[in-house]
Every structure is written in C-alpha cells, then in structure tokens.
Image (spheres, rainbow, N blue to C red):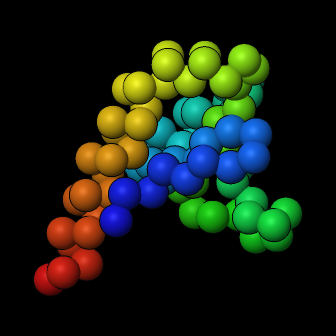
Amino acid sequence: MVRQVPVKDGATIKVPEDLAAELLEQDGISEFRPMDKHTMKNSVLIRRDPPRDHQGDKGLFQAAMEYVYVLSKENKR
C-alpha cells in the first residue's frame, strides 16, 4: 500500500521518522491529523500554493513510496 493521500489543501505522505522530523521544520509542512484528531505517526501534510509547486516534492513522494514498500515487506513476514 502506497500512502500518498491527496487532501483538500495538500498531500500527505508517510516517511521515516527522522525525515518526518526534518520536514516538520520546513514551511508548508505540518503533522497529518485526519479530521483534526490524532496525529498519524511519521505522516506529514505538505501544502503548496500554488499546488503546481508540488512538482518540487517529487523526491519526497519517491522516498515515501520506497519507505512504505519496505514496511509492507516487513509486515508480510
């Protein structure tokens, strides 16, 4: 399962804990809190204005796909 979820005003990705911490220090990136409730572990919400600026986040999306792929392999054991 690849976790790149488009939301009303951004995209959320699941990344390794150290990368999540690093990203949370950047403008336009916050913790992902579905329905404004609990924080999803290692998931960040990326907001870009204009949305086409997400083009610059391709490396983050790739890192998220690789991370979730590894997690899925670990869960199959």
In screen coordinates, is 60 left or right of 46?
A: left
Residue drawn at point x = 39 percent, y = 45 percent: 64
Residue drawn at point x = 47 percent, y = 39 percent: 19
In the image, residue 42 sits, relative to residue 22, either above or below, namely below
Q: Nearer the viewer, residue 38 or 55?
A: 55
Residue 38 in sight: yes
Q: Quadrant of the C terminus?
A: bottom left
Q: Residue 38, percent across and down?
A: 76, 70
Q: Residue 25, percent across and down?
A: 68, 30
Q: Nearer the viewer, residue 18 or 41?
A: 41
In the image, residue 42 sits, relative to residue 54, either above or below, namely below
In screen coordinates, is 74 left or right of 26?
A: left
In this figure, what is the number of numbered marks? 0
In the image, residue 57 sits, relative to residue 31, either above or below, namely above
Q: Quadrant of the N terminus?
A: bottom left
**Quadrant of the image occupied by residue 54:** top right
Residue at the right extreme of this rendering: 36
Residue 30 in sight: no
Q: Nearer the viewer, residue 28 or 3?
A: 3
Q: Residue 72, percent across and down?
A: 26, 69
Residue drawn at point x = 27 percent, y = 47 percent: 66
Q: Residue 76, percent across and down?
A: 18, 81
In the image, residue 71 sits, relative to residue 48, either above or below, namely below
Residue at the bottom extreme of this rendering: 77
**Quadrant of the image occupied by residue 62:** top left
